[in-house]
Image (cartoon, rainbow, N blue to C red):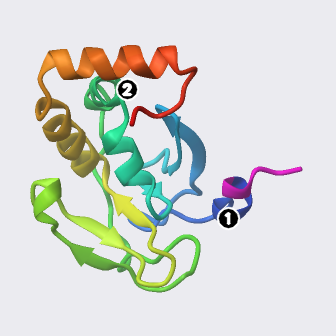
Amino acid sequence: MTAPWLAESSGGRCPRCDDAYLEHTYLGAVAVDRCPACMGHWFRRGDLAELLKSPTLSYVANHVGGMRLPAVRVTAPPECPRCAIGLKRARPAQLNQAAVDVCPRCGGTWLDGVELQRVLAKQARGKDPLSWLLETIEFVLTSGRKPR
């Protein structure tokens, strides 16, 4: 049996550069689709919020912050890799005005590589080290369940 997220997001083209197919990967415990050409990331509805609340966020932010990002060649307005309709650009205040592209139908979110780095770095700086330590300890002690 195939995992539901594989069936929902497999085979889509990159909404930004349209040069490559998205490949499945994980950022912490969150399954995402990443473009190997431009390093942009596609999140299903709610998955970006889950990542930003994760006790492993500082680790993920350090990993993503170290990625080398190629220049992006935009060939067309971005389309949802799942629904094939145009994405809407937003700059939410809670994401430090980062440019995100959102699908109005499925609620998926696209972040270019540089925007993902910016969002994760800001969110990781937002918590003091003691909070991160306590959340990480609770995460480990509860066998991988999210802290409450």
Position of 57 with respect to 10 (left or right) is: left
Q: Residues within 10 Å of mark 2 (few under 14, many from 20)?
A: some
Residue at 16% across, 66% down: 92
Q: Quarter of the image holding residue 77?
A: bottom left
Q: How far across and how far down the image is residue 118, in percent?
A: 17, 43
| Mark number, residue 129 | none
Q: Which residues are magenta?
A: 1-5
Q: Quarter of the image holding residue 124?
A: top left
86 within the magenta span: no
Farthest right residue? 1
Q: Which residue is mark 1?
A: 8
Q: Which residue is mark 2?
A: 56
Residue 40 in sight here: no
Q: Residues within 10 Å of mark 1 (few under 14, many from 20)?
A: few
Q: How far across and how far down the image is residue 141, in percent?
A: 50, 14
Up-down: is 147 above or below 84? above
Residue at 33% across, 68% down: 74
Question: Pointers 2 and 1 in contact (CB under 8 A)?
Answer: no
Residue 52 in sight here: yes
Q: How far across and how far down the image is residue 36, in percent?
A: 49, 44
Instruction: Provide the secondary structure element on which disc 2 rests.
Output: loop
Up-down: is 134 above or below 75? above
Decide which of tag 2 and tag 1 comes sooner along the chain: 1
Q: How far across and how far down the image is residue 79, in percent?
A: 45, 77
Q: Looking at the magenta stretch, what is its main secondary structure?
A: loop
Position of 85 with respect to 110 (left or right) is: right
Observer-nearest residue: 133 or 37? Answer: 133
